[in-house]
Image (tube, rainbow, N blue to C red):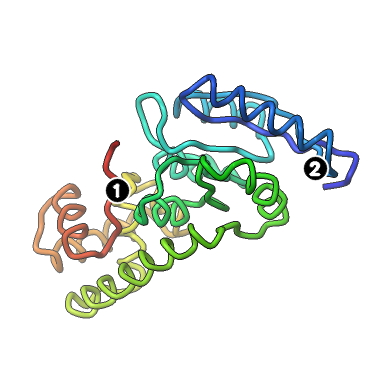
Amino acid sequence: MANSEKLSVLLVDDEEGFRQGLRTLLSFYTMNSSLPLEVVGEADSLEQVLQFTTENYPDLILLDLELTGSDGITTLARLKEISYTGKVLVLSAHQEDDWIFRSMQAGSAGYVFKNRLATQLCEAITTVIKSEIYLPSEVASGFFRCFQSYSNSCAKARHQLHLTQREQEVLHWLAQGASNEAIAKHLYVTVATVKAHLTSIFEKLKVTSRTQAIVAALKLGLVVCQPSDG
């Protein structure tokens, strides 16, 4: 991005007051640094995010994890499905390890606690627009704790069930709620190939449906649990 160009930003949060505070903070950055930002829209629900992104394609989305009628993890997954390649930076009050890990796994370029915005947001934006990952130390430690736990349990279960790498990938997207067509698109294979993988997965997990497969995979640690509401 050239210095004269402004970075278009979409603010996503279900609290209007917080979005207004973000606008003020971003305006301050623009006036007092070499970080030219322009807030081009606001959204408080998954539907609004997808519609605005499809029509306007912002460079950066500042995303809360709790939205009207949905959540930020689902929003990240849906943004992938519509092939959004801009940057998403999560701003959240949630400090639990699983929220951090799920957000990064779902495609966030960084994670900032809301109570650290004043000291970290400018650096976070500067980092992610350079296609780098932003994780401050207090966030990174939680992410890697969860990553290590997930990796260990996943590797053990995969070994015991003899899941292939491709079957693990299919299972991951299945847990995201992706259709066979969406999974095929993500993995660059045919729908028939996805169905064949699912048949094999069902046999190995000893289940007969997609829902049963997801539940079994969650219990075995093959996929990461969705964060609980709260």
Q: Is residue 182 above or below residue 50?
A: below
Which quadrant holds residue 117? top right
Asked whether disc 1 touches disc 2, contact meaning CB atoms under 8 Å apart, the reply is no
Q: Residue furthest right?
A: 4
- Name the spot of residue 186 as percent of width and height, x first: 46, 54
Q: Is residue 156 above or below residue 66?
A: below
Residue ID at (52%, 39%): 82
Judging depth in this view, the residue of 139 and 187 nearest the camera is 139
Q: Which residue is mark 2?
A: 35
Judging depth in this view, the residue of 186 and 68 nearest the camera is 68
- Name the spot of residue 51 as percent of width and height, x first: 54, 25
Count numbered badges in the picture: 2
Q: Which residue is mark 1?
A: 226
Q: Is residue 86 visible?
A: no
Residue ID at (45%, 65%): 141
Q: Which mark is residue 21?
A: none
Q: Residue furthest top?
A: 16
Horizontal side of 1 relative to 175 (left or right) equals: right
Horizontal side of 204 relative to 227 (left or right) equals: left
Q: Amino acid at mark 2?
A: Leu
Q: Is residue 35 visible?
A: yes
Determine whether the residue tagged by mark 2 lies in a helix, strand or loop.
Answer: loop
Which quadrant holds residue 94? top left
Horizontal side of 96 relative to 208 (left or right) equals: right
Q: Earlier in the sequence, mark 1 or mark 2?
A: 2
Q: CA distance from mark 1 to mark 2?
A: 35 Å
Determine whether the residue tagged by mark 1 lies in a helix, strand or loop.
Answer: loop
Which quadrant holds residue 171? bottom left
Q: How packed is label 1: few (under 14 Cα within 10 Å), some, or many (20 or more)?
A: some
Residue ID at (36%, 72%): 148
